Every structure is written in C-alpha cells, then in structure tokens.
C-alpha cells in the first residue's frame, strides 16, 4: 500500500516540461540568420527548468541553464549561434545557416531527481537562390485583338524550385485555362530545379485604354520571409480591329437597311407615279 502511494506520487512528479511549439524554418535564405524558437510549459507539480539545449544533428550547439544564469554557444561544429534569448517559457536562438540540410533539436530537461527530458526536432535546409531574374519569353511584338498570346516565364535553377504566379494589369491570374500549373524541371547535379509557367492571354478579356497589357511574372521561394523576384513586360494590343469590324458590319447593316428603305421608298414613289400617270386615264 505504501509502495503504491509512493509510486503514484512518483508518477505524478515524473511529468517534465513539455515542448509545446518548435519553430524551425524549413528553408532559409543564405543571406539571413535563421531564427529557431522552442516554447515549453511546466505543470504546477513539475520541478523547475534544468536546461534547454539545442542540437544540430547530434552536436550540441547551445545550452541554457537558468540555475547557473548561463547561456553557452558551442563552436566546435562550425555553426555560429549569433544571438539568443531564453527564459522559463521559451528559448530563441539565431544561427548562421550552413549549406545543406540539418536536423535541429530542442531538448528541455527538468530538475532532478529525474531530470526528465522532452525533445522535438525539425529539418532546416539552406535555400539556393536563383542567379537570374525570372525570364519572360515568347512575347509577341503586337497581338491582334481576337487573337491570343502565349507567354512563358522561366525561373532560374534554385533550391527549392520557385513557384510562379502571373499578373495581368496587377490582377493575379488563377483561371487554369489562362495559367496552367508551375512546371518543375528535373534536378541538376546539385539538386537545383528550374520552373516555368505559361500564360495564355486573350487581350479581349481585358479592358485596356493604353494599347498594352502589363504582364508580370513573380517567382517565389518559400523561405522565411519568402524570396520574391518579379519581371514585367508590356504586351501591345493592336487597336481594336474587332470593334472596328463590328462597327463596320453594323454600318453595313445600317447601310443595307437604308438601301432597303430607299428601295422601298423608290418602289413606293414609282408605284405612285405610275398610279398618278394612270389617274388621268381613269379620270378620262
Ligand atoms: C566561433 O567561431 C567563429 C569563427 O568560426 C569565431 O569568429 C567566433 O568568435 C567563435 N565564437 C565563440 C563563442 O567561440
Ligand atoms: C540579439 O537579440 C536581442 C533581443 O532578442 C536584440 O535586442 C539584439 O539586437 C540582438 N543582437 C544581435 C547582434 O542580433
Ligand atoms: C529530415 O530529413 C531526413 C533526410 O534528409 C529525413 O530522413 C528525416 O525524416 C527528416 N526529419 C524530419 C523531422 O523531417
Ligand atoms: C517554357 O519554357 C520552358 C523552359 O524554358 C520550356 O521547357 C517549355 O517548353 C516552354 N513552354 C512553352 C509553352 O513555350
């Protein structure tokens, strides 16, 4: 009985700090330090926080030990911890990202006697930025109204592949008949991929008073914050032959109506003249 009571006390006391949130960016921009955040909670019966440790793969890179008022960065793995801000509820570090993928682990332990541990991991990969701005190809010098133009936007090789969006006069294009999907090339020797997306523009679908449509291609890499590159071009639209041909046929219609009316009037007058010329005979 005593053993049972002791056991249950032990079980209740064995609860440790629990990691509630681990935030490691999946992709990092090589030009920025990456911020890694670990948040944890403590139950009322838990012992106080003993330490928070950050690992890159299996190497400890940072340790926070609140009882000793100490934070330590470990430099032996070549990873530079640039800054840190830790307390009893969260521990945030900023690191200079390294090429490739690494698994980052946050490990929280409570004070003894058990030094119970909770840990969570997440991968982080250094993005490889596209070297060139997105390239728009296939732009016709002039498109006739009533015709369509096929314009291609290609984003340079990058890791991960960029997603591409098209805008016509600042309006995002989502209709699958107008923009298909972003196509992604095979990986090159370094694992980088190019991507492209084709815009089908029907100038008649847009109202333009300037003689051109502004086409913008936007390539986005899902780093944090996202890396965005854009390219804009003008698609010149020939001055409304469709409207003038419509006007033309309308004028024709008017003209033929007129001629029909003229014809009818002529017939009427001819008939009247004939009739009148007959009248005297009748009168006679
Ligand atoms: C870590 O290493 C870098 C060079 O790799 C050095 O500049 C820096 O001072 C070192 N930091 C510590 C805390 O030893
Ligand atoms: C480190 O972080 C603190 C607050 O978290 C900030 O005030 C400080 O400017 C940062 N230092 C560097 C070198 O980034
Ligand atoms: C991290 O990446 C490795 C391979 O690079 C994979 O095996 C592992 O499951 C990933 N871990 C997480 C937490 O995504
Ligand atoms: C668009 O460009 C990509 C890459 O340059 C190419 O593979 C693809 O065939 C092009 N598509 C069209 C419709 O021109």
Image (cartoon, rainbow, N blue to C red):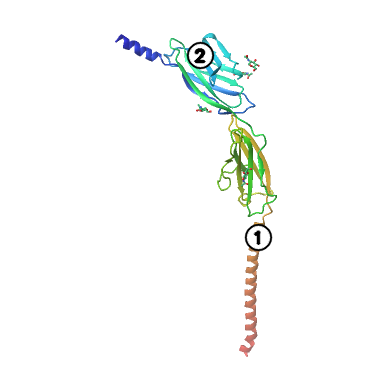
Q: Depth check: give the residue in front, 261 or 215.
A: 215
Above or below 39: residue 141: below
Residue lying farthest to the front in this orientation: 189
Dividing the image into 4 quarters, which one contains the C terminus?
bottom right
Q: Distance between the residues labelled 2 and 1?
A: 80 Å
Pick the quarter of the image with the N terminus.
top left
Res 245 label: 1
Spot occupied by residue 199 in the image (x, y as percentages of width and height): 61, 46
Most distant residue in the bottom direction: 284
Residue 102 lies in quadrant = top right
Q: Which of 232 and 75 is in front in this view?
A: 75
The label nearer to you, 2 versus 1, is 2
Q: What residue sits 65% from the left and 60% below the top?
A: 245
Residue drawn at point x = 57 percent, y = 13 percent: 72
The residue at the point 59 percent across, 24 percent down is: 34
Q: Position of residue 220 (x, y in %)?
A: 60, 35
Residue 225: image location, x then y, percent: 60, 29
Q: SS class of the residue under badge 2?
A: strand
* Displayed quadrant of residue 254: bottom right
- In the picture, the disc for residue 51 is 2
Point out the tag, 2 or 1, that comes first from the N-terminus: 2
Left/right placement of residue 142 relative to residue 121 reads right
Compared to 218, does 64 lie above or below?
A: above
> Looking at the image, which is closer to me, 247 or 9?
9
């Amino acid at each position: 009985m005593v053993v049972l009571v002791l056991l249950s006390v032990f079980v209740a006391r064995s609860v440790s700090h629990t990691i509630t949130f681990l935030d490691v960016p999946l992709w990092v921009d090589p030009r920025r330090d990456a911020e890694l955040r670990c948040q944890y909670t403590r139950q009322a019966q838990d012992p106080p926080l003993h330490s928070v440790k950050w690992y890159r793969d299996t190497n400890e890179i940072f340790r926070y030990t609140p009882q000793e008022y100490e934070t330590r960065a470990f430099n032996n793995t070549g990873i530079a911890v640039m800054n840190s801000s830790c307390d009893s509820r969260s521990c945030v570090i900023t690191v200079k990202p390294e090429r490739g993928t690494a698994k980052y682990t946050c490990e929280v332990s409570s004070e003894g006697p058990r030094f119970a541990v909770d840990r969570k991991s997440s991968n982080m990969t250094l993005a490889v930025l596209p070297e060139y701005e997105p390239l728009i190809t296939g732009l016709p010098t002039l498109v006739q109204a009533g015709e369509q133009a096929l314009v291609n936007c290609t984003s340079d090789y990058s890791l991960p592949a960029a997603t591409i969006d098209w805008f016509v006069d600042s309006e995002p294009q989502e209709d699958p008949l107008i923009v298909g999907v972003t196509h992604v090339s095979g990986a090159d020797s370094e694992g980088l991929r190019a991507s492209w997306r084709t815009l089908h523009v029907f100038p008649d679908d847009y109202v333009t008073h300037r003689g051109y449509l502004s086409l913008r291609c936007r390539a986005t890499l899902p780093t944090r914050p996202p890396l965005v590159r854009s390219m804009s071009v003008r698609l010149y639209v020939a001055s409304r032959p469709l409207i003038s041909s419509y006007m033309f046929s309308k004028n024709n219609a008017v003209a033929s109506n007129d001629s029909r009316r003229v014809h009818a009037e002529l017939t009427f007058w001819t008939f009247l003249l004939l009739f009148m010329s007959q009248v005297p005979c009748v009168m006679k």
